[in-house]
Amino acid sequence: MVLRVFPDKILQCRAVVNDFSFNPPIPPSAQHKDMYAPKYHKDDGNWDATKQLDPLAPQIPSTEDGGWDGQPTYRKDGY
């Protein structure tokens, strides 16, 4: 989907992608000999899904745990 934004309107467009294109080769890094290490990674080169999170920031509780200021936020099962 492509959104074209104008001062007076927003158009939704459909992008056409080449079916025969491919990704360019990925340069090597020290952790991974055949590709760059992930942006957020541990010292061993594996992904670290929590690296970008601020451990000091307050966590938003799920709706089952009371939500944020009593308002619904999200469900633990993802729906």
Image (cartoon, rainbow, N blue to C red):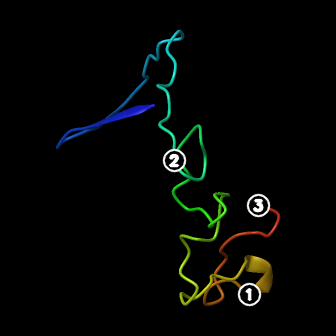
Three-letter amino acid code of the residue under disc 2: Ser
Neighbours of disc 1 within 10 Å: few (<14), some (14-19), many (20+): few
Q: Earlier in the sequence, mark 1 or mark 2?
A: 2
Q: Nearer the viewer, mark 1 or mark 2?
A: 2
Q: Which mark is residue 78?
A: 3
How far apart are labels 2 and 3 at the CA level?
35 Å
Mark 3 residue crowding within 10 angstroms, few (<14) / some (14–19) / many (20+): few
* Amino acid type assigned to the residue bearing label 3 in the image: Gly
Q: Earlier in the sequence, mark 1 or mark 3?
A: 1
Q: Which marked residue is nearer to the observer: mark 2 or mark 3?
A: 2
Q: Is residue 74 left or right of 10 when viewed as pictured?
A: right
Residue occupying image coordinates x 76% and y 61%: 78
Task: Name the amino acid type tagged 1.
Answer: Gly
The span from disc 1 to disc 2 (Cα, nearest Å) is 45 Å
Seen in the image, is 9 located left or right of residue 27?
left
**Residue drawn 70% across and 70% down?**
74
State the separation of the CA atoms marked 1 and 3.
16 Å
Locate residue 4, reporting x and y percent. Answer: 29, 34
Q: Residue furthest top?
A: 20
- Residue 53: image quadrant is bottom right
Residue 15 at x, y percent in the picture: 42, 22
Which residue occupies the extreme left position in the image?
7
Q: Image point 58% across, 71% down: which residue?
A: 51
Q: Residue at 65% x, 74% y: name it.
A: 73
User: Is the residue marked by circle 2 packed among few (<14), some (14-19), or many (20+) residues within 10 Å?
Assistant: few
Q: Which mark is residue 29?
A: 2
Of 65 and 71, which appears nearest the observer? 65
> From the viewer's perspective, is residue 27 above or below residue 43?
above
Q: Circle 1 sits on which residue?
A: 66
| Viewer-side residue, 19 vs 2 | 19
The quarter of the picture where the C terminus appears is bottom right
